[in-house]
Image (cartoon, helix red, strand yellow):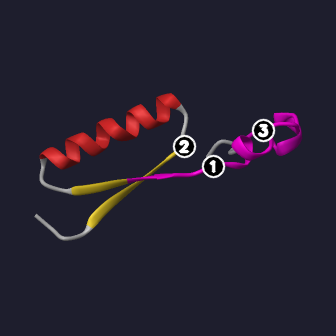
Amino acid sequence: MSNKTIRIGTRDSQLATWQAEKVARELEKLGHDTELIFVKSEGDLDLTTPLTEMGGKGVFT
């Protein structure tokens, strides 16, 4: 279809990876090239600070 690759950003948890792979498979069925890009959020990187001290919202996005 196109020579452009659709990059899908996802966390590297099992659930997020499974969901992103499912989307990638559907896009590939339509002829698109895909690539998964694994990202880490503040909540993934800081495992010691309580979530409430990080602001509570948007920590994993």
Magenta-highlighted residues: 36-57
Is residue 30 depicted above or below 4 in this figure?
above
Give percent across and percent down for residue 12.
54, 40
Discs 1, 2 touching: Cβ within 8 Å = yes
Give the residue displayed 78% in from the left and 38% down from the top. Answer: 56
Distance from disc 3 to disc 2, alpha carbons, whole Å, reads 18 Å
For image coordinates 82% across by 44% down, the residue present is 55
Secondary structure, mark 3, is loop
Residue 56: mark: 3
Q: Residue furthest bottom?
A: 3
- The residue identified by callout 2 is 11
Give the residue type that dot 3 points to. Gly
Q: Is residue 55 above or below residue 4?
A: above
Marks 3 and 2, the one that precedes in the sequence: 2
Badge 2 local density, few (<14 within 10 Å), some, or many (20+)?
A: some
Q: Position of residue 23 (x, y in %)?
A: 30, 41
Which numbered disc, 1 or 3, marks the residue that appears first in the sequence?
Answer: 1
Specify whether 50 is left or right of 23: right
Counting residues from the start of the chain, the first of labels 1 and 2 encountered is 2
Q: Residue 53 at what x, y percent from top left?
A: 89, 40
- Say if mark 3 contacts mark 2, CB within 8 Å: no
Magenta region includes residue 11: no
* Mark identifier at residue 40: 1
Q: Nearer the viewer, mark 1 or mark 3?
A: 1
Q: Quadrant location of the N terminus?
A: bottom left
Rendered location of residue 35, percent (x, y): 35, 55
For image coordinates 19% across by 71% down, the residue present is 3
Badges 1 and 3: C-beta atoms under 8 Å apart?
A: no
Q: CA distance from mark 1 to mark 2?
A: 6 Å
**Where on the picture, by quarter, is residue 60?**
top right
- Camera-nearest label, 3 or 2: 2
